[in-house]
Amino acid sequence: MDKKIKELKNDTEAELKRIDKMPDGEAKRAALAELARYHDNMTRNLQHERLIHLMVTILFAALMIGSWLGLLSWFNADDGQYDLVTWLMITAVAILTILEAAYVRYYYLLENGIATLYPQQRTLHQKTASMLK
């Protein structure tokens, strides 16, 4: 996903430089409006993906917390005995904890990557608005 965000940012910058070299007129205005529309749609798609990943991260956090609580209550009920079920629960809790850490990291990168697109989007909208004057 990080590659997709960087690619969108680099492609938009390159296209914006190409449009800036065009002579003022209807073609430049149309190209700028189309680029702004494309960038806006891609940003919305990435924001939607961010929302889905936030929900998945919250779900796995709830599962992880529940599994930790279950493991702690199992230790209290089992008087600290380590049988097969205890080891299976420890394994499940460890897997969920590692998975949650990976989801949090991915969501962090996704959130910060999308945030880098906002100044670019603001620039596009300002240039589009100035062309309409």
Image (spheres, rainbow, N blue to C red):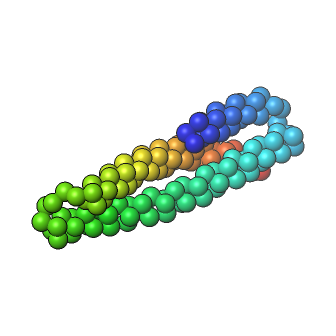
Along the viewing direction, whichever of 93 and 54 lies nearer the viewer: 93
In the rendering, at what x and y percent does residue 94 appear?
A: 32, 51
Is residue 108 visible to us here? no
In the rendering, at what x and y percent does residue 121 appear?
A: 62, 47
Is residue 52 visible to us here? yes
The answer to which quarter of the image holds residue 84 is bottom left
The number of callouts visible is 0
In the rendering, at what x and y percent does residue 88 appear?
A: 32, 56
Along the viewing direction, whichever of 115 and 93 lies nearer the viewer: 93
Left or right for 101, reference 73: right
Please state, as top left, top right, bottom left or bottom right, where the N terminus lies in the image: top right
Left or right for 38, reference 121: right
Left or right for 55, reference 100: right
Along the viewing direction, whichever of 104 and 126 lies nearer the viewer: 104
Q: Residue at x 44, y 58 (%)?
A: 57
Query: Residue 64, relative to residue 33: is it above or below?
Result: below
Residue found at the very far right of the displayed protein: 26
